[in-house]
Image (spheres, helix red, strand yellow):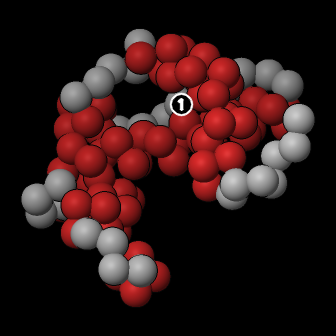
Amino acid sequence: GLLERWNLPVSLTAPVRHHHDFARAPEHAMEAALVHLGCALSSLMEHDLRQGEPHVLEVPPQAWTQAGCAPEDVEEAIVDVSMHWLQVIEIVAPGSVLL
């Protein structure tokens, strides 16, 4: 895959590869579950922005257990993402956000 072509370490490529099937992640199970939850949270936040109303984060209970967090952590994560998304964009694409 692309991540391997970029010569990224397995500790990064394995969680991404297995995030849809996080229970089968060989050595990086927790990280794969975290990527899975991150994708679900991203979709939730995108939906909320478009629709203007909250939506429910639907992920299997095993994802929470495997990731080592709980549904109660979602609210705090949304606040953190909302406060820091410009910084993340600047890391991913330097110079693309001009304030």
For disc 1, the marked residue is: 57
Is residue 18 in sight in this rendering? no
**Left or right, 95 with reference to 33:** right
Residue toward you, 35 or 91: 91
Q: Is residue 74 above or below residue 41?
A: above
**Left or right, 57 with reference to 10:** right
Q: Is residue 19 above or below residue 35?
A: below
Q: Is residue 54 above or below residue 57?
A: above
Quarter occupied by residue 7: bottom left
Q: In the displayed orientation, state which residue is furthest to the right.
A: 99
The x and y percentages for residue 37 are 42, 40
Q: Is residue 44 above or below residue 11?
A: above
At x 56%, y 21%, the residue is: 80
**Left or right, 31 with reference to 84:** left
Is residue 87 in sight in this rendering? yes
At x 65%, y 36%, the residue is: 87
> Callout 1: 10 Å neighbours few (<14), some, many (20+)?
some
Quarter occupied by residue 84: top right
Residue toward you, 47 or 17: 17
Q: Quadrant of the N terminus?
A: bottom left
Q: Quadrant of the C terminus?
A: top right
**Left or right, 24 with reference to 97:** left
Element under disc 1 = loop
The x and y percentages for residue 54 are 71, 21
Kindly identify the amino acid type of the residue bearing the numbered disc 1. Leu
The x and y percentages for residue 21 are 30, 60
The x and y percentages for residue 35 are 39, 48
At x 85%, y 25%, the residue is: 52
